[in-house]
Structures are given as C-alpha cells and as structure tokens.
Amino acid sequence: MTVSDIARRRPVITLLVVCQSSIGLIFGGIGLFLPVIRTDLGISFTEAGTLAAASNLTYALMQIPSGYLADRFTPRRLFLIGMLGMNVLAALFAVLDSYPLLLIDQALAGVFRALVFMPGMLLMTGLFPPGRRATAMGLYVVGGFSSNILLSLVGPLLVGPLGWRLLFALFAGFGLLTLVLYRFLAGPAAREPARSPARFSELPGLLRQRIVQLTAVVQFTRLAVAQGFTFWLPTYLVVDRGQSLATAGLVAALASAISAPVNYLGGYLSDRIGRPLLIIGVSLSVLTAGLALLTYVPGMLGVLGVVALISVSIQVYFGPLFALPLQVLGDRNAGLISGLGNFWANLGGFAFVYALGAVKDVTDSFRAGFVSLAVLCVVALVAARLTRPLLAGAHGSAPQ
C-alpha cells in the first residue's frame, strides 16, 4: 500500500475518526455533566459512578466476543450495528427519568460500544500498510479526544439553557448522521480474502501466552487511569477544589486538547523508531508522578500543570500497546488478541470508575483513589519491562 493509496482513502479514514468522536461525545457527556445529572436524579456518588461502571462492565465482557466476531465475519457489519445501537440508546438516555432504567440503558450501551470499537480499529488498520499499525490505532482514538475538547468547551455553556437531556438527544442525532455518511462514503463492502476462521478453542492457548498476560496488566492499568481520571476530573474540580462547572469544563478541554495530538504522535513515533516499549515505559513513569501529585499541589495553577502532565501520557501509548502482542504472535487472530487486551483494559476502567466514586463517599476525598492509580502504574511498568525478552525474541534482535 502506497502513500497515494492512503490519500485516496482519506475521506473514509476521516469518517471513521468522526464516528469515534460521536461515541466520545456520549460517554464523555456523562462524566462532564455528572454533577448536574447526579443532582437531577438525586443519587449518591457511588450510584453516579455505577452509570459509567455498568457500561464499562458490559463493554469489557463484550471485547472477546467482539474481536472473535470481527475475525470470523466482516468488521464493517459489526461496526454499523454497534453505531446504530449506541446512538439509539443515547437517545433513550435523554428521555429516561429513572435511575434503574438509566443503569440498564448504560449496560446495553456497553454491548453496542464494543461492536464499534474493536471492529472500527480493525477497519482503520486495514486502511494503512502493516508497518504503520500503531499509527493507525493512535489515529483511531483521536476521535474520542477531539470530541471531548469540543464537549468540554461548549457543553458547560449549553447545559444551562438546553439541559443535559436535550444535549444527549443532539449527540444521538449527530452519531446517526455520521453513521449514514460513513455508509455512503465507504461504499459496498469488499470481499475479504479466504482465510482459516478464528475459533474460540484457540482462546486458552492465547491466554497462556506470556506476552498476552503481561500486556493484559498494562491494558488494565491503561483504562483504569484513563477512564478513572477523565470521568471523575470534572467532579473532583467542582467538589474538592470548589470550581464552577464551566471552569471544570475548560480544564477537561485542556486535558483533551493535549491528549488528542500526542496520542497519534505516540503511535507514529513508535512505528518510526521501532521502540514501542520506550513509549510505554516513559508514559507510565510520567503518569505515576502526575497522579501521585494531583491532590497535593496547591492552587489551581498547580492543578493545571499536573493535569497537563497526566494528559500528555494518558493514552499516548495506546497504539504501541495494542501493536505489541501482534508483533510477537502475528496477525491471524488480530481481532481476538486485541479483544483480549481491551477486555482487561475495560475491567480496569470498570473497577476504578466505580472505586473512585466509592472511595469519595467513604473518605470524602478523591486522594486515595488517585494515589492508588499511581501505584497501579508502577505495577504496569514492571509488567512492561518483563516483555522485553519476548519482543526481542520475536524480532531476533537486542531488547528494546
């Protein structure tokens, strides 16, 4: 595949990123508007955390089935189904007024979100040459960060006059529009080359692979940090730091504005220098320092500095991390392998989105929760270090 081939596919690549952006609006909106949603529904911090945790749990449980189905059938079909279901449920979220029904809505949303993410990532990597896999993966998730920038800047200004329910209805409408545009621009699905289908019987063998086990630890940490920090940051700033929702939105926008480009650059740099473990190790080291400092720095200026530090590294290693096991094990079960990684990642997201809310209820502070994320980053650093001989053996070269 040449550079001109990628240029011809640029509109489809752009639409995939925009589709991911529409999903980012829905999930990010719950975190940003959580103080308003919590007050409107009259629920506790723990119950508020379960709105995201329910989605994360079903999303995590669907990762392996989603990857398996994407290997066995066409990723595009699953992607279209997932986009449709996710946006219909977002529209329902806008009209439901019962906490149990909203919880069910979010649990179902996690199922359809899984059908968007993994198949969408396979669609994106299929539009790039093999040597630029980490770049493609990094570009795919830029959509979620870019939509969070817009949401964090504009959302607090609109939630007063429009209300969070109308905003979620608008998010759903935007998502359905992007779905129609992608279906139109992508054209009819191409016939895929014949290959031996993936089988669930291969899953136990994959689970015994040391590279899968070690990257699972890093994946668990990745989303525990990314979702725990991103979801609770606006609430932390409003409740613990006494800031307005508008100020919290501006800080969240700053975080997303920093994360979006460096996320793509992380994948690009990993492909260019061929050292994914360097990107992963530096990122986890910076996250350890930032999360440990977050609740201790005085004043908002100090908070802004630490938030910027965390945002630089929070997802910059996404592409290199997903590419790592594929470099060792090959591409045949790419969907299943990536689904395994994202399964553990979303278990981390589920556990810590819930845990940070529960810790806040018990201790009346987010400090213990953020410090525990820093400790988790240290564990992930050790796991990443242990993958070096495996990657070196796959390439027949010195450890990276």
Image (cartoon, rainbow, N blue to C red):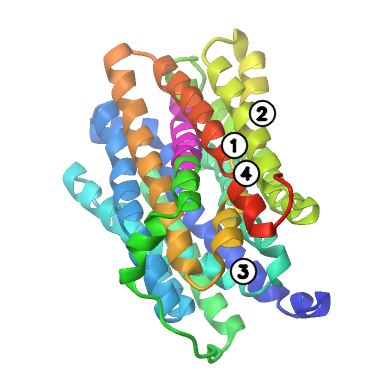
On the image, numbered disc 4 is attached to which residue?
Answer: 388
Residue that carries the numbered disc 2 in the rendered image: 308
Local SS, label 1: helix
Give the amino acid at mark 3: Thr
Residue in view at x 46 percent, y 39 percent = 227
Query: Which of label 2 and label 1 is nearer to you?
Result: 1
Q: Sequence-wise, which precedes: disc 2 or disc 3?
A: 3
Q: Position of residue 358 (x, y in %)?
A: 29, 25
Earlier residue among tags 2 and 1:
2
Residue 238 appears in the figure: no
Residues at badges 1 and 4 in contact (C-beta under 8 Å)?
yes
Q: Are marks 3 and 4 in contact (CB under 8 Å)?
A: no
Q: Nearer the viewer, residue 144 or 195?
A: 195
Instruction: Work out how far the residue at label 1 is from the one at label 4, CA to CA, in angstroms.
Output: 6 Å
Q: Quadrant of residue 105?
A: bottom left
Magenta stretch holds residue 28: no
Picture layout, residue 100 above or below residue 282: below
